[in-house]
């Protein structure tokens, strides 16, 4: 995923703000999870609200980024 975004970096930077923010959230979340995998050999999920599956900030960033990118591509 990170490689794909870096491949399209120039096109993304010329896009509108919604695409830039969505892309940044996806790449940032992917890098965060990659760091966890390298350092701890697993992704650490530290937010647990009981009735919802546990997750972390990186997972949230990826999810929000994907939603923003879907909105961007639907509007385009």
Image: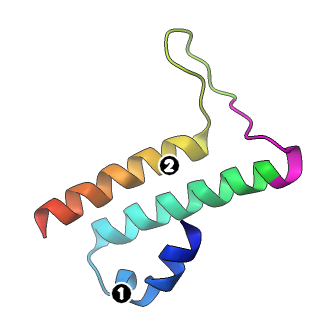
Above or below — where is 39 with respect to 21?
A: above
Tell me: residue 18, above or below residue 71. below
39, 48: nearer the viewer: 39
Span highlighted in magenta in the image:
38-45
Residue at the spot 20% in from the left edge and 65% down from the top edge: 73
The residue labelled by disc 1 is: 11
Name the image quarter holding the N terminus. bottom right
In magenta segment, residue 48:
no
Magenta-drawn stretch, dominant element (helix, strand or loop): loop
Q: Secondary structure at mark 2?
A: helix
Q: Quadrant of residue 17?
A: bottom left
User: Which residue is labeled 2 in the image?
Assistant: 61
Q: Nearer the viewer, mark 2 or mark 1?
A: 1
In the drawing, what numbered circle is on residue 34? none
Element class at badge 1: helix
Q: How much space separates mark 2 and mark 1, taking CA atoms?
A: 21 Å
């Amino acid at each position: 995923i990170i490689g794909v975004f870096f491949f399209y970096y120039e096109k993304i930077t010329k896009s509108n703000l919604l695409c830039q923010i969505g892309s940044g959230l996806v790449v940032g979340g992917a890098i965060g999870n990659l760091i966890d995998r390298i350092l701890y050999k697993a992704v650490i999920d530290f937010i647990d609200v009981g009735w919802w599956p546990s997750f972390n900030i990186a997972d949230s960033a990826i999810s929000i980024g994907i939603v923003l990118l879907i909105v961007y591509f639907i509007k385009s």
